[in-house]
Image (cartoon, helix red, strand yellow):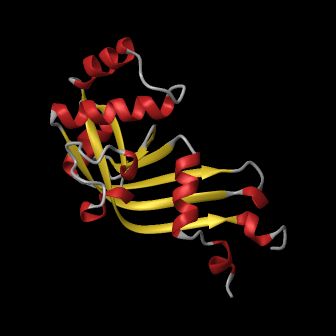
Amino acid sequence: MSRRDQIRMSADEVRAFLDGERTVTCATIGRDGRPHLMPLWYVRGQHLPADGPWGPASQNGRGEHLWAWTYAKSQKVRNLDRDPRATLQVEAGTEYHLLRGVMLETDAVVHRDLDTVTALGLEIFARYGDGGELSDDARAAVTAQAAKRVGLQFIERNRVTWDHRKLAGVY
């Protein structure tokens, strides 16, 4: 078995890894052709409520997509409006034998519908908050921000994963 095959994560390992990490680096393509990289908070689609504006989590595989939100006027949104291709990377580990990561080549869909953006913002803040229900004040703050934001849905086209811990220190 090749080293590449040895370190590849299973689908279940990828889901657990993405659920356990908190920041994705999003690379879009700038007007001059250079990559534009920015960190984003994210949720996996399966964590979004089934009755949300994105439809049931199982519909069209939406449960596996990563979603984020950002300012509508941000450079990454301008880039995605021109070219919807984005590469996402989530990584962990500070030493070579501990490195783990998921890289996703995606097509991004920019959602501008206020209901979608608001629901997504509430889900993101619930994930990144203290883990409990959002307070009324927090919900109001997210709702107020939503008017200036967009939702980003990343539809996976290709996946590369690695978990160097599987090599048990033997390279």
Most foreground residue, 142 or 100 = 142
Residue 41 visible in image = yes
Q: Is residue 170 left or right of residue 111?
A: right
Q: Quadrant of the N terminus?
A: bottom right
Report x, y in % for residue 86: 35, 54
Report x, y in % for residue 107: 29, 58
Q: Quadrant of the C terminus?
A: bottom right
| Residue at 35% over, 57% down | 63
Residue 36 visible in image = no
| Residue at 38% over, 16% down | 138
Which residue is situated farthest in the right direction here? 169
Most foreground residue, 21 or 87 = 21
| Residue at 21% over, 37% down | 116
Report x, y in % for residue 91: 60, 51
Q: Is residue 2 left or right of residue 36?
A: right
Which residue is situated farthest in the top direction here? 137
Q: Is residue 94 left or right of residue 131?
A: right
Most foreground residue, 10 or 73 = 10
Which residue is situated farthest in the left direction here? 113
